[in-house]
Amino acid sequence: MTRQNLREGYKTIAAARIQRLFEFADETFNKNQALADRYIKLAWRLKTRYNIKLPLNIKRKFCKKCLSFWKPSVTCRVRIRSGCVTIVCLRCGHVARLPYKPRES
């Protein structure tokens, strides 16, 4: 087994574990918010260690500044303006602006 294959195997295991940690964070958020944030920090550490790109559905679930799990109206505020979705973290005040195109009906 070459080093390249070994490294790719580690990346796939880490990606699966990151996905599972986000599922754990979503399940435990209502009971223990600190534990949910801990899961996010563990996932972030795995992401940086193995240089993994996160999919969009995971990228938009946490604050990039304080690494807190986002639940709309609990830990973040979501506003829709013309061509932009603005998410404000209620813990650190970080603002994330995401572009979008409105649907044409």
Image: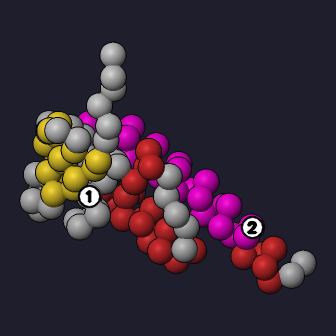
The amino acid type of the residue labelled 1 equals: Cys
User: Where is mark 1, residue-wise?
Assistant: 63
What percent of the width, then of the height, locates residue 36? 32, 51
Q: Residues within 10 Å of mark 2 (few under 14, many from 20)?
A: few
Quick check: is 20 in the magenta stretch? yes
**Which residue is painted at 15% across and 61% down in the image?**
94
Give the overall secondary structure of the magenta segment: helix
> Colour scheme in the image?
secondary structure
Q: Are marks 2 and 1 in contact (CB under 8 Å)?
A: no
Q: Secondary structure at mark 2?
A: helix
What percent of the width, then of the height, locates residue 20? 53, 48
What percent of the width, then of the height, locates residue 84? 22, 44
Residue 64 in view of the camera: yes
Q: Secondary structure at mark 1?
A: loop
User: Where is mark 2, residue-wise?
Assistant: 9
**Which residue is painted at 34% across and 48% down in the image?**
61
**Which residue is painted at 37% across and 58% down in the image?**
40
Q: Quadrant of residue 82?
A: top left
Left-right relation of 3 to 57: right
> Which segment did they paint magenta?
8-32
